[in-house]
Image (cartoon, rainbow, N blue to C red):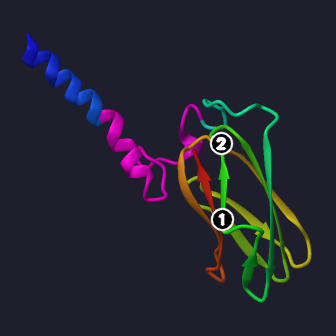
Protein backbone atom coordinates (compact mmCIF):
# COMPACT_ATOMS: atom_id res chain seq x y z
CA UNK A 1 0.00 0.00 0.00
CA UNK A 2 2.84 2.44 0.79
CA UNK A 3 4.36 1.91 -2.67
CA UNK A 4 1.03 2.77 -4.30
CA UNK A 5 0.73 5.99 -2.30
CA UNK A 6 4.29 6.91 -3.21
CA UNK A 7 3.60 6.36 -6.93
CA UNK A 8 0.55 8.62 -6.72
CA UNK A 9 2.53 11.35 -4.94
CA UNK A 10 5.38 11.17 -7.48
CA UNK A 11 2.89 11.41 -10.35
CA UNK A 12 1.15 14.39 -8.72
CA UNK A 13 4.44 16.25 -8.17
CA UNK A 14 5.54 15.57 -11.77
CA UNK A 15 2.21 16.78 -13.14
CA UNK A 16 2.41 19.98 -11.10
CA UNK A 17 6.07 20.68 -11.97
CA UNK A 18 6.29 20.02 -15.71
CA UNK A 19 3.84 22.71 -16.91
CA UNK A 20 5.80 25.37 -15.00
CA UNK A 21 9.02 24.24 -16.62
CA UNK A 22 7.46 24.51 -20.07
CA UNK A 23 6.15 28.03 -19.36
CA UNK A 24 9.62 29.19 -18.35
CA UNK A 25 10.66 29.26 -22.03
CA UNK A 26 8.29 32.15 -22.67
CA UNK A 27 5.51 30.15 -24.25
CA UNK A 28 2.47 28.94 -22.37
CA UNK A 29 2.52 25.50 -20.84
CA UNK A 30 0.26 22.83 -22.19
CA UNK A 31 -0.35 21.08 -25.46
CA UNK A 32 0.69 23.93 -27.68
CA UNK A 33 -2.85 25.03 -28.42
CA UNK A 34 -3.63 28.72 -28.58
CA UNK A 35 -4.97 30.27 -25.36
CA UNK A 36 -7.95 31.43 -27.40
CA UNK A 37 -8.88 27.77 -27.89
CA UNK A 38 -8.78 27.10 -24.17
CA UNK A 39 -12.11 26.79 -22.36
CA UNK A 40 -10.84 29.27 -19.74
CA UNK A 41 -9.46 31.83 -22.22
CA UNK A 42 -10.43 35.36 -21.29
CA UNK A 43 -11.52 34.40 -17.77
CA UNK A 44 -9.44 35.33 -14.78
CA UNK A 45 -8.52 32.42 -12.53
CA UNK A 46 -6.16 34.33 -10.28
CA UNK A 47 -6.18 36.92 -7.55
CA UNK A 48 -5.93 40.15 -9.56
CA UNK A 49 -8.84 42.48 -8.97
CA UNK A 50 -11.26 42.89 -11.89
CA UNK A 51 -10.54 46.63 -12.01
CA UNK A 52 -6.77 46.16 -12.23
CA UNK A 53 -5.56 47.46 -15.61
CA UNK A 54 -1.91 47.80 -16.56
CA UNK A 55 -1.36 50.29 -19.38
CA UNK A 56 1.72 50.05 -21.57
CA UNK A 57 2.66 52.69 -24.14
CA UNK A 58 4.90 51.72 -27.06
CA UNK A 59 6.29 54.19 -29.59
CA UNK A 60 7.83 52.91 -32.80
CA UNK A 61 10.19 55.15 -34.79
CA UNK A 62 12.57 54.07 -37.56
CA UNK A 63 11.84 50.40 -36.84
CA UNK A 64 12.76 50.65 -33.16
CA UNK A 65 10.29 50.23 -30.31
CA UNK A 66 10.52 52.33 -27.16
CA UNK A 67 8.73 51.69 -23.87
CA UNK A 68 9.18 52.85 -20.29
CA UNK A 69 10.42 49.41 -19.27
CA UNK A 70 11.99 46.42 -21.01
CA UNK A 71 10.00 44.04 -18.80
CA UNK A 72 6.49 44.71 -17.54
CA UNK A 73 5.35 42.61 -14.57
CA UNK A 74 1.66 42.00 -13.99
CA UNK A 75 -0.35 39.80 -11.69
CA UNK A 76 -2.10 36.82 -13.20
CA UNK A 77 -5.65 37.82 -14.10
CA UNK A 78 -4.83 41.49 -14.68
CA UNK A 79 -6.09 43.27 -17.76
CA UNK A 80 -3.26 44.60 -19.92
CA UNK A 81 -3.88 47.48 -22.30
CA UNK A 82 -1.09 48.07 -24.82
CA UNK A 83 -1.20 51.22 -26.95
CA UNK A 84 1.22 51.30 -29.86
CA UNK A 85 1.98 54.27 -32.11
CA UNK A 86 4.20 53.71 -35.14
CA UNK A 87 5.66 55.95 -37.83
CA UNK A 88 5.24 53.15 -40.41
CA UNK A 89 2.84 50.32 -41.23
CA UNK A 90 3.75 47.44 -38.93
CA UNK A 91 2.29 44.51 -37.04
CA UNK A 92 2.59 44.24 -33.26
CA UNK A 93 2.46 40.76 -31.71
CA UNK A 94 2.35 39.34 -28.17
CA UNK A 95 3.78 35.82 -28.09
CA UNK A 96 2.06 33.17 -26.01
CA UNK A 97 -1.24 34.97 -26.26
CA UNK A 98 -1.08 35.00 -30.08
CA UNK A 99 -2.57 38.46 -30.24
CA UNK A 100 -1.68 40.84 -33.06
CA UNK A 101 -2.40 44.45 -33.83
CA UNK A 102 -2.12 46.01 -37.30
CA UNK A 103 -0.49 49.42 -37.05
CA UNK A 104 -1.06 52.39 -39.35
CA UNK A 105 1.47 55.21 -39.59
CA UNK A 106 0.79 57.97 -37.07
CA UNK A 107 -2.31 56.31 -35.60
CA UNK A 108 -2.39 54.73 -32.16
CA UNK A 109 -3.69 51.17 -31.93
CA UNK A 110 -4.73 49.47 -28.71
CA UNK A 111 -4.61 45.80 -27.80
CA UNK A 112 -6.35 44.56 -24.62
CA UNK A 113 -5.91 41.14 -23.09
CA UNK A 114 -6.39 39.34 -19.80
CA UNK A 115 -3.02 38.07 -18.54
CA UNK A 116 -4.26 34.66 -17.47
CA UNK A 117 -1.31 32.53 -18.61
CA UNK A 118 1.76 32.67 -16.34
CA UNK A 119 5.21 33.07 -17.86
CA UNK A 120 7.36 35.59 -19.69
CA UNK A 121 6.16 36.59 -23.15
CA UNK A 122 7.87 38.68 -25.79
CA UNK A 123 6.00 41.56 -27.42
CA UNK A 124 7.52 42.45 -30.78
CA UNK A 125 7.10 44.05 -34.16
CA UNK A 126 6.79 41.51 -36.95
CA UNK A 127 8.14 43.43 -39.94
CA UNK A 128 11.21 44.96 -38.30
CA UNK A 129 11.66 42.14 -35.75
CA UNK A 130 12.23 44.70 -33.00
CA UNK A 131 11.35 43.61 -29.47
CA UNK A 132 9.10 46.09 -27.68
CA UNK A 133 9.11 44.55 -24.18
CA UNK A 134 8.64 41.35 -22.22
CA UNK A 135 5.37 40.72 -20.40
CA UNK A 136 5.93 38.79 -17.16
CA UNK A 137 2.73 37.26 -15.78
CA UNK A 138 2.86 35.74 -12.34
Q: Residues within 10 Å of mark 1 (few under 14, many from 20)?
A: many
State the image coordinates of residue 28 (x, y, percent, origin top left). Answer: 48, 50
State the image coordinates of residue 111 (x, y, percent, origin top left). Answer: 77, 56
Q: At 11% from the left edge and 17% from the top edge, which residue is drawn? A: 4
Q: Give the secondary structure at mark 2.
A: loop
Q: Which residues are magenta?
A: 15-40
Does 37 appear in magenta? yes
Q: Is residue 24 left or right of residue 91?
A: left
Q: Name the quadrant containing residue 8.
A: top left
Q: Which mark is residue 75?
A: 2
Residue under label 1: 93
State the image coordinates of residue 68 (x, y, percent, origin top left). Answer: 77, 68
Badge count: 2
Q: CA distance from mark 1 to mark 2?
A: 20 Å
State the image coordinates of residue 14 (x, y, percent, origin top left). Answer: 27, 36
Labels 1 & 2 near each other (Cβ < 8 A): no
Q: Quadrant of the C terminus?
A: top right
Q: At 38% from the left edge and 51% from the top edge, which residue is drawn? A: 22
Does 46 appear in magenta? no
Q: Name the quadrant containing residue 40.
A: top right
The numbered mark, 1 or 2, whose residue comes first in the sequence reads 2
Query: Is 2 above or below relative to 10?
Result: above
Q: Residue furthest bottom?
A: 62
In front of the other: 15 or 36: 15
Amino acid sequence: MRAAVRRVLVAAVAAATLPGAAAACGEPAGTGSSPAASPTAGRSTASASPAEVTRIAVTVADGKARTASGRVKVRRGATVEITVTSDAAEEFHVHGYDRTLALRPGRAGTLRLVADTPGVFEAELHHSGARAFELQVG
